Amino acid sequence: MTETSYFRPVRLGMLTPSSNTVLEPVTTAILRDVPEVSVHFARFRVTEISLRDQALGQFDNQAVLAAARLLADARVDVIAWNGTSSGWLGFDTDIRLCEAITAETGIPATTSVLALNQVMQATGANRFGLVTPYLHDVQARIIANYTAAGFDCVAERHLNDPGNFSYSEVSAETLATMVRAVALARPACITTFCTNLRAAPLVAALEAELGIPIYDTISVVVWQSLRLAGVSPARIKGWGGLMQLDIGPR
């Protein structure tokens, strides 16, 4: 009997921005220690992150639901929106999206932002640092939404880039410099808030250096998706303290 035959197969479905090239390889790498878990991706068109009507319209629920239906055909155990759009659109948009996905497919749903917010609430991390590649006005909208939800952004760094493809080209050195700058304010946690940033592989080393939890938006949606699928994230090593968190009910 092989080692993997002790576990039932688990399939995670990820809704992916079309111009994103980071979340797929990073998600696959995170899951390498849980061989019974496979991850499956469906794309919908996202090429620009801004507050222009054209850019905001990319996140229309009908486009996302069409991609979710394709994942449902693969009989995935969870469907996750691996993106951060509700940071500027409003957290309620992700709540409604998850409700719509589950109503349409019968499959539990989550998102990067809802998973992040759950972690921050459960750990009492009300003072947080924010690192993104986004435009000035997008960053301001994200901070305003978190302020309205009772969180205090005590430090932030952003690149003022409309992206989305270009986010994948931000260097590890640049990301680490941004995180270190935000850490000077000693927030309760730092979030690297964009699923096309190659930040997750840096988290474990930066946490050890800075002594501050870092919650990457690719990592948090993997963490929550595993929990919803009944798989312990604690089996994942080397990707930061998040995977070892046990915050109770899913």
Image (spheres, rainbow, N blue to C red):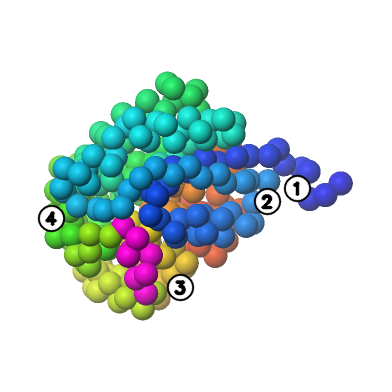
Q: Are marks 4 and 1 in contact (CB under 8 Å)?
A: no
First in sequence: mark 2 vs mark 3: 2
**Element at label 2:** loop
| Mark nearer the viewer, 3 or 1 | 1
Q: Magenta segment, principal secondary structure?
A: helix
**Element at label 4:** helix
Can residue 118 be seen?
Answer: no
Amino acid type of the residue that numbered disc 2 sits on in the rendered structure: Pro
Q: Are marks 1 and 2 in contact (CB under 8 Å)?
A: yes
Residue identified by numbered label 4? 137
Residue 70 screen position, x and y as percent = 51, 33
Q: Are marks 4 and 2 in contact (CB under 8 Å)?
A: no
Residue 179 screen position, x and y as percent = 30, 70
Q: Which residue appears at 42% of the width and 21% of the height?
A: 103
Amino acid type of the residue that numbered disc 1 sits on in the rendered structure: Thr
Residue identified by numbered label 3? 205
Residue identified by numbered label 2? 35
Magenta span of residues:
164-171
First in sequence: mark 3 vs mark 1: 1
Please tell me in which quadrant of the rendered image residue 60 appears: top left
Residue identified by numbered label 1? 4
Circle 3 Cα neighbour tier, 10 Å, few/some/many (<14 / 14–19 / ≥20): some
165 or 7, which is in the foreground? 165
Circle 4 Cα neighbour tier, 10 Å, few/some/many (<14 / 14–19 / ≥20): few
| Mark nearer the viewer, 4 or 2 | 4
Please tell me in which quadrant of the rendered image residue 170 appears: bottom left
Determine the CA span between mark 4 and mark 2: 41 Å
Q: Magenta stretch: residue 209 in it?
A: no
